[in-house]
Image (cartoon, rainbow, N blue to C red):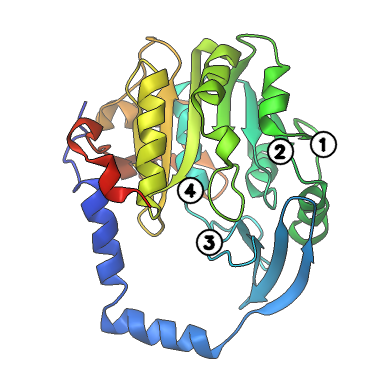
Amino acid sequence: MEPENPKPGLISRTRGKIRRLMDPLGKALSFMMEKKKPEIIFEADSQFNHITISELDGVRTMYLGLNAEEAETAISLVNPDAPIFEYPGLLFISLVLRPKARRIVMLGLGGGFIPRLCQRYLPDHKLTVVEIDPLVVDLAGVYFGFTPGGNVQVEIADGQEYLAKLPPKSQDLIWLDAFNGDYIPSHLATRDFMRLNRRILTKEGLLAQNLHSSRMADYLKQLDLINKIFEEPALAFCGDRCANTIVINPNGPEPIPRERKDLARAAREFGHLIGPYNLLEEINKQEKLPDLAKTKLDRYSK
């Protein structure tokens, strides 16, 4: 179902963002940033990643991969709850769609910004974060102020292996936010893995994935994969100032609000503020997904 007052398609919108970045102001800002380089405060190789943590203008950022250009996590040192990243607010829309959901599994810790918000603002929700890299867990504590506890626990494990051990229909929400230095790890982007998610979710459960539309080939392949496994159409919410798109799939035919006015009503009923994120604003970022039947996927292949 199309949203009210639909925005331009995601592909053309992404290209529009790139063009806007090249206007004179964008060039001036880029020049200024080039003159001021971030300070590297940590850099090392773990078993799984090359990890870099840097600081610039009071913002601390983690990168995974030797040549990573997209930040894994970032926090303001002055106000750790500040919404440096836009996508957590989009991810929280899944809570609005299923307000009775309480059991959540999240793959990928990063600096622990989302789990920390869950500790503080969602005490009735039980969140289990699965992170494969023990060094990432340590760095989240030392440099980003996240400590497991309360309603949030961390399991050091491969995400697929951890989910495979969970009982069927045991989770209300699954949040997929696992990235390596390139994109989603390949074993977490397969039909078998998507089927595993379906098996673990309740009938009313939701799968929410953080995808990057800046990587159009990978993005379209992941959407194609989702369409092949999940029977119900996805909802998507795309950032205004980033290339992150949160794609949310119902596990079964239980209705979810899809029209903008229904989403707004659900957000008000849920309680629309989660820390720095106003979900009444976030739902306005609803995006029409590309029609894969009319999209030549090989056009975007590498």
Mark 4 to mark 1 CA distance (whole Å): 24 Å
Query: Is any atom of residue 258 visible in this view?
Result: yes
Going by the numbered disc 4, the residue's amino acid type is Tyr
Disc sitting over residue 119 in the figure: 2
Where is residue 137? Give x, y as percent. Answer: 79, 48
Q: CA distance from mark 1 to mark 3?
A: 29 Å
- Regarding mark 1 in the picture, which secondary structure is present there? loop
> Is the residue marked by circle 4 packed among few (<14), some (14-19), or many (20+) residues within 10 Å?
many
Q: Secondary structure at mark 3?
A: loop
Front position among marks 1 and 3 = 3
Picture quadrant where residue 144 is located: bottom right
Mark 3 crowdedness (10 Å alpha carbons): few <14, some 14-19, many ≥20: some
Q: Cβ–Cβ below 8 Å for labels 4 and 1?
A: no
Q: Are marks 3 and 4 in contact (CB under 8 Å)?
A: no
Q: Give the amino acid at mark 2.
A: Gln
Residue at 64 percent across and 12 percent down: it is 170
Label 2 sits on a secondary structure element that is: helix
Name the residue carrying label 3: 70
Q: Which mark is residue 87?
A: 4
User: Would residue 285 be found to the left or right of residue 76 on screen?
Assistant: left
Question: Which label sits in the foreground, 2 or 4?
Answer: 4
Q: Residue at x 37, y 34 (%)?
A: 223
Q: CA distance from mark 2 to mark 4?
A: 18 Å
Which residue is more in the foreground, 28 or 214?
214
- Image marks 2 and 1: residues in contact by CB distance under 8 Å: yes
Earlier sequence position, callout 2 versus callout 3:
3
Q: Which residue is mark 1?
A: 149
Q: At 62% from the left edge and 44% from the top edge, which residue is drawn?
A: 114
Say above or below: 13 vs 127.
below
Q: Earlier in the sequence, mark 3 or mark 4?
A: 3
- Judged left or right of residue 217, residue 296 is left
Of residues 12 and 221, the one nearer the viewer is 221
